[in-house]
Amino acid sequence: MKVENISLEEIDEVFNLYNIASAHQKSKKSVVVWPEFDRDMVSAEITEQRQFKLVIDNEIACIWAITFSDAQIWVKRNEDPAIYIHRIATNPDFRGHNFVASIVDWAKDYAKMHAKQFIRLDTIGENTRLIKHYCTCGFNFLGMFNLPNVDELPPHYKEGPVCLFEIDLKKRA
């Protein structure tokens, strides 16, 4: 198992995994479904080396994106030194391997290398199973919040309150 940056040549596979994740979300009926993400946004993330893949036996098992700023979601907390994880999508052939825990291990090292104190992520709506899973992987659940301005965020942020999670690396040192 290894973590690598995604290349532009793999962008179709990224969107394939996003589509599979959206279909899986739809099948759950009680969770917020991802919209179709902007290809230019994803391409920029890849070019900026902010899209990652977890590779097992030369296959992409899981993907995610990161950023170092997320002001529209984290508002005042965005001033903290943090890495923000977005759009974790798992290849269905590899479901059940608890890749969030692997991403957390990777993110701890990545955050330290970039002098970040926090690892953060969010999800939309009251998905109690996902909330519990993120907590099991080491995140503290900060609660559910109504965002003050969702106009420039992807459309699924209009579907309900946002659940915020973080790991404070200084508390765990």
Image (spheres, grey):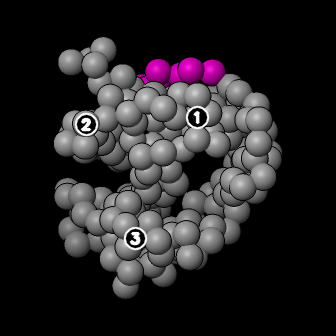
Q: Is residue 56 visible?
A: yes
Residue pointed to by mark 3: 46
Residue at 47% across, 71% down = 44
In percent of width and height, residue 48 lies at 37, 67
* Residue numbers of the magenta segment: 133-143
Label 1: which residue? 74
Report whether 36 appears left or right of 43: right
113 in relation to 141, above or below: below
**Which kind of residue does numbered mark 2 sit on?**
Ala
| Quadrant in which the N terminus is drawn | bottom left
- Where disc 3 sits, the SS reads helix
Alpha carbon separation for disc pair 3 and 1: 23 Å
The quarter holding residue 108 reads top left
| Residue 13 shown in magenta | no
The residue sitting at the top extreme is: 171
Residue at 28% x, 19% y is 170
